[in-house]
Image (spheres, helix red, strand yellow):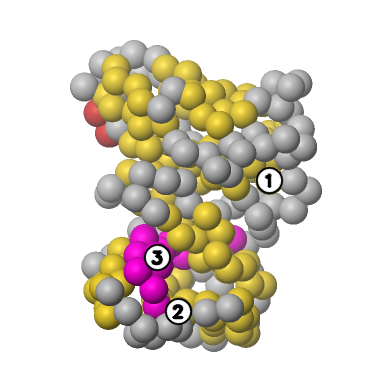
C-alpha cells in the first residue's frame, strides 16, 4: 500500500462548478500537508500548505485536513478553465521528507 | 518562470550508461531538492541539499548520487541506467523555509 493515495481521475467539470479533490494517507506521522498544481509539461507549483488539522482558505481554494480520518481535501470554488491541470497532494512528517499522491487530472469545460 | 533552471531539457541514452543532470536554484536559495516523476510511480522525492550539505534522503537508488557545489548549483548523477529510469527529473529550490519550493521545468530522460 502506498503511503499516499489519490484518485487519478480524470475529473471533468463545467465552468463555475465546485471541485473536490481528495487524498488519503496511512502514516500518522505526517504533520505537513500540501497541494500542488501542475500544468502540462511544467513543474509543480505550490497552491496551499497546512500544518496539522484544520482548514485554510486562499481565494477560491480551501484546503482541509482531517488527521483523525487521515484524509485531506482541496476545494476549488467557481472553477475556471485556467484551473485545468493535474493536482498533486503531498505530505511530510518533519519538513525534510516528502510523499506525493499520483495526481488528479482536472479539466474545467467552458 | 520559477527562476530554477535545469539542463538539459531532454536526454536520450542507452541502458548501462551514465548521465548528469544539472540544476541552478533561484538566486539566494540555499536548498535544492531532486524529484523523479514517472507515470507509474508519480512524483518521488529523491534527495535534498542545503548549502552544500546533504539534508535529507528519500527514495534515491544507490546508482544515483547528487551533490551541491559552492556556487549552489546541483548535479544529479544517474549511472548503470535501466529502462525504468526513464522519467521526468525535477529540481526545486527553496530559501530558509522548506514549505515554499519552486520547481524547475524538468529534464526528460529517456533510456532506450
Q: Nearer the viewer, residue A89 or B5?
A: B5
Q: Same subunit under labels 1 and 3?
A: no
Q: Is residue B43 magenta?
A: no
Q: Nearer the viewer, mark 1 or mark 3?
A: 3
Residue ID for mark 3:
A82
* Visible residue check, residue A2: no
Residue B36 in the image: state x and y as whole percent. Answer: 43, 40
Indicate the secondary structure of the residue bearing disc 3.
Answer: helix
Against B80, residue A43 (above or below) is below
Q: Quadrant of residue A22?
A: bottom left
* Visible residue check, residue A56: yes
Question: For the residue carrying disc 2, how many other residues have a C-alpha within 10 Å: few (<14), some (14-19), or many (20+)?
Answer: many
Residue B17 in the image: state x and y as whole percent. Answer: 34, 13
Q: How many marks?
A: 3
Q: Nearer the viewer, residue A92 or A107?
A: A107
Determine the residue positioned at 55% across, 43% down. B1
> Magenta segment range?
A79-92
Q: Is residue A87 magenta?
A: yes
- Residue B94 numbered tag: 1
Amino acid at each position: 500500500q502506498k503511503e499516499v493515495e489519490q484518485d487519478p481521475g480524470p475529473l471533468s467539470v463545467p465552468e463555475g462548478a465546485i471541485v473536490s479533490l481528495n487524498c488519503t494517507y496511512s502514516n500518522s506521522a505526517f504533520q505537513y500537508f500540501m497541494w500542488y498544481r501542475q500544468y502540462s509539461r511544467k513543474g509543480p507549483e505550490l497552491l496551499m500548505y497546512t500544518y496539522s488539522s484544520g482548514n485554510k482558505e486562499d481565494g477560491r481554494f480551501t484546503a482541509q485536513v482531517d488527521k483523525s480520518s487521515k484524509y485531506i481535501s482541496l476545494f476549488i470554488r467557481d472553477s475556471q478553465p485556467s484551473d485545468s491541470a493535474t493536482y498533486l497532494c503531498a505530505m511530510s512528517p518533519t519538513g525534510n521528507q516528502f510523499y506525493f499522491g499520483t495526481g488528479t487530472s482536472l479539466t474545467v469545460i467552458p | 518562470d520559477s527562476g530554477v533552471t535545469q539542463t538539459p531539457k531532454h536526454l536520450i541514452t542507452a541502458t548501462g550508461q551514465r548521465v548528469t543532470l544539472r540544476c541552478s536554484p533561484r538566486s539566494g536559495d540555499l536548498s535544492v531538492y531532486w524529484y523523479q516523476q514517472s507515470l507509474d510511480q508519480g512524483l518521488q522525492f529523491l534527495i535534498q541539499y542545503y548549502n552544500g550539505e546533504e539534508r535529507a534522503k528519500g527514495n534515491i537508488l544507490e546508482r544515483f548520487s547528487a551533490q551541491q557545489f559552492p556556487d549552489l548549483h546541483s548535479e544529479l548523477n544517474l549511472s548503470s541506467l535501466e529502462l525504468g529510469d526513464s522519467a521526468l527529473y525535477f529540481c526545486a529550490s527553496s530559501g530558509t523555509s522548506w514549505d515554499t519550493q519552486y520547481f524547475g521545468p524538468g529534464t526528460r530522460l529517456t533510456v532506450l
